[in-house]
Image (spheres, grey):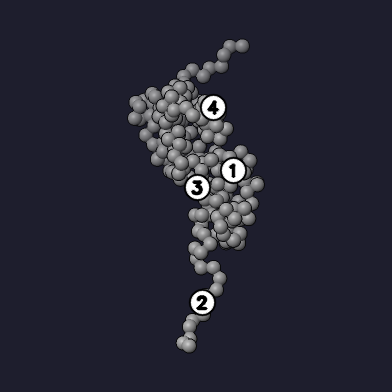
Amino acid sequence: MTGQSPRPKGRRPGDSGTKEQILDAARDLFADVGFERATIRAIATKASVDPALVHHYFGTKDELLVAALQLPVDPAVLFAGIGTEEGNGRGAGETVVRRVLALWDDTDTRAPLLALLRTAVSHERAAAALGELFANTLLAQMATLADRDDASLRAALVGSHIGGLVLGRYVLRLPPLAGAAPDDIAGMVGPVLDHYLSGDLARPAL
């Protein structure tokens, strides 16, 4: 019998899963049950890996959250050119709505976005990440379009309306909003966003 090299023991790289599988599992559970209830063990089970492998790649659950919150798209690209293509910002609101709905209607990007939104409701770090994302992308672009002394407030109103729209359509799935055509939604919500950007926001007389 000829001698043979002993077979290596232990887990070979990739045998029990990959970092991306763990991230996908984390995003799914964060979206389904929230950050607090999504344990490392549950994430590992969903990813078909040993919990030790999750700790090896990501450390703590908070560090895993940070990695899982990376968006599948570049927000700067998503909102680039809004206002210039419509001409002086007119009709920018409808463009914003169309792009946001197209992003969320894409099944490849919806899961990580849902995880971010749902986790932000119950976790301070996720909420801060979402707020920073909005401030550096959509709100910054909208403030430029407003070009007024109260531009930051106007941009925040746009952001809050978009946030409410996403929550109602994709998380709460309010009928008939959840099943409405994107063109119909954009046509109705767009003018409201335009009013936030350029309309009269004066307080009514008491």
What's the residue type where badge 2 is placed? Arg
Residue 68 placement, left or right of 35 = left
**CB of mark 4 within 8 Å of CB of mark 3?**
no
Circle 3 residue: 70
Q: CA distance from mark 3 to mark 2?
A: 39 Å
Q: Earlier in the sequence, mark 3 or mark 1?
A: 1
Q: CA distance from mark 3 to mark 1?
A: 18 Å
What's the residue type where badge 3 is placed? Gln
Residue neighbourhood size for the residue with mark 3, other residues' Cα within 10 Å, grouped as few (<14), some (14–19), many (≥20)? some
Circle 2 residue: 7
Residue neighbourhood size for the residue with mark 2, other residues' Cα within 10 Å, grouped as few (<14), some (14–19), many (≥20)? few
- Nearest the camera: 22 or 146? 22
Q: Earlier in the sequence, mark 4 or mark 3?
A: 3
**CB of mark 3 within 8 Å of CB of mark 2?**
no
What's the residue type where badge 1 is placed? Asp
- Tag 4's secondary structure? loop
Up the image or down, 8 lies above or below 48; here it is: below
Give the foreground label among 4 and 3: 4
Residue at (59% x, 61% y) in the render: 50
Give the foreground label among 3 and 2: 2
Measuring from the top left, give residue 157's x and y in whole percent.
Answer: 52, 27
Query: Outermost residue, front direction?
Result: 1
Residue neighbourhood size for the residue with mark 1, other residues' Cα within 10 Å, grouped as few (<14), some (14–19), many (≥20)? some
Circle 1 residue: 32
- Tag 1's secondary structure? helix
Q: CA distance from mark 2 to mark 1?
A: 41 Å
Residue at (46% x, 41% y) in the render: 107
**CB of mark 2 within 8 Å of CB of mark 1?**
no
Up the image or down, 70 lies above or below 184; here it is: below
